[in-house]
Amino acid sequence: MFVRDRRAAPNAIVSPEDEAPVERYLDTLDANGLAAGVLVQPRFPGPDNSYLLHAIARVPARLRGIASVLPTIPAGELARLKSAGIAGVRLDLVGREPPDFSAAPWPAHFAALAQTGLHLQVHAEGPRWLQILKPLLASGVRLVVDHFGLPSEGLGSRCPGFQDLAAASRGADIWFKLSAPYRFTPATAAWACADVLLTVAGAGRLVWGSDWPWPRQTPIQRYGETIDWLAEWVPNAAAREQILGANARTLFGFNKPAGVAAPPWKRL
């Protein structure tokens, strides 16, 4: 979600030319029978969450957000973000060397996140998890793994980093977002990864994401394709309903909707 008047951060790797305003996103939700959605702060605006907060304020019952913040953010500001509809903060390590999470300001930051009730959504490549998983688990904050954990090219569920994540999920507060199979190669590896997560982590720790509006070139022609993936990854209809419904409400803090015209899981 972005508009052209948002200035890109200096370290942005993608600065999209097209626009994806909140109005377009809401139309997309309606067209696909989705009661609510979660907006993730893109990388290019950095920690300027003003448009994200503006979008959530439009329809606070339907939208939640994942913000980008600096680790030095005051605890009071985190509480303000939570009250404005932010459910978690994003840690984007793709293409970056991770910091020393045992050194200041990270321990205090993680403690503030946990105390505020915000989770940490981590975007990192598969091999990177071998380095960062242990200190992140020790932080005590709830982890949400973005895009299956981005397994190494050609390895899929055999990626050591992914295997460490799956194993850790047996006893740790780790959730996984099933989304964006085109971000790792081959895309079909997502099926095997989903099968592992269903077996080890269980359906109760999974959520789904569309990765809309796809700022990088992808083969997606329509939003519904991203919903259809879930039918292939999760063949059990009850598990899909849990992922799209109860799990999302628990993780992101949505209220149970009174009714949805065309729940997406009914057509999967």
Image (cartoon, rainbow, N blue to C red):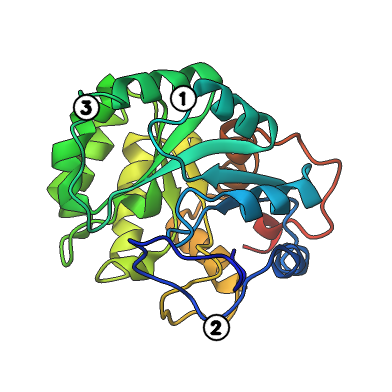
Q: Are marks 3 and 2 in contact (CB under 8 Å)?
A: no
At 31% from the left and 26% from the top, the residue drawn is: 105
> What amino acid type is highlighted by mark number 1?
Leu
Disc 3 from disc 1: Cα separation:
15 Å
| Relative vertical location of residue 228 with respect to residue 141 in this rendering, above or below | below
| Relative vertical location of residue 46 with respect to residue 6 in this rendering, above or below | above
Disc ID at residue 113: 1
> What amino acid type is highlighted by mark number 3?
Pro
Disc ID at residue 221: 2
The C terminus lies in which quarter of the figure?
bottom right
Disc 3 from disc 2: Cα separation:
39 Å
At 53% from the left and 62% from the top, the residue drawn is: 210
Q: Is residue 123 left or right of residue 65?
A: left
Disc 2 from disc 1: Cα separation:
37 Å
At 55% from the left and 73% from the top, the residue drawn is: 225
Which residue occupies the foreground of this view, 61 or 171? 61
Q: Are marks 2 and 1 in contact (CB under 8 Å)?
A: no
> What amino acid type is highlighted by mark number 2?
Gln
Residue 192 found in image quarter? bottom left
Which residue occupies the foreground of this view, 236 or 241? 241
> For numbered disc 1, what is the local secondary structure?
helix
